[in-house]
Amino acid sequence: QVQLVESGGGLVQAGGSLRLSCAASGRTRSVYAMGWFRRAPGKEREFVGSISWSGGLTYYSDSVQGRFTIARDNAKNAVYLQMNSLKPEDTAVYYCAAQFFSGSDFGSWGQGTQVTVAS
């Protein structure tokens, strides 16, 4: 099992930046990739982006490409989501998640952190 704890959410003005952190503990050596997801009020959970744990290969959704950056620190068992040029539509609860095999579902999830972007 891998335990995940997100932090860094808050209230920011449109155009501003926030950096979310996700601390992983437990069997982190079993992690293949880490992902960030978000759920806005009244909407389905949305994939934001992911990073492979070993090679650092990243993927992003079209809605955040060019504005958000995912990075990892294997020594600290941490993953970060740098969010720039934030828009009101980025308002959501953001979750990090761990994937244990290529192509599999994300099997471990954090509790989420709220990001609110004011217009």
Image: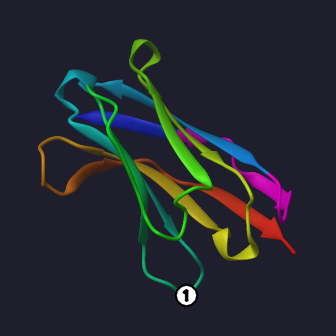
Name the residue: 57% across, 76% down. 40
**For residue 57, what is the image quadrant?**
top left
Q: Is residue 22 magenta?
A: no
Residue 88 as seen in the image, left or right of residue 55: right
Q: Which residues are magenta?
A: 6-16
Residue 47, image x, y percentages: 40, 65
Name the residue: 53% across, 70% down. 63
Q: Quadrant of the N terminus?
A: top left
- Disc 1 residue type? Gly
Residue extending furthest toward the bottom: 42
Residue 36, image x, y percentages: 44, 52
Q: Quadrant of the C terminus?
A: bottom right
Give the answer, above or below, for where 50 lies relative to 12.
Answer: above
Residue extending furthest toward the front: 66
Residue 102 as seen in the image, left or right of residue 119: left
User: In this figure, which residue is indicated by the disc labeled 1?
Assistant: 42
Tell me the crowding category of disc 1: few under 14, some 14 to 19, or many 20 or more residues within 10 angstroms, Cα based. few
Name the residue: 69% across, 59% down. 115
Q: Please state which of residues 15 and 22 is positioned toward the viewer in this rendering.
A: 15
**For residue 116, what is the image quadrant?**
bottom right
Residue 71, image x, y percentages: 49, 33
Q: Secondary structure at mark 1?
A: loop
Residue 21, image x, y percentages: 57, 36
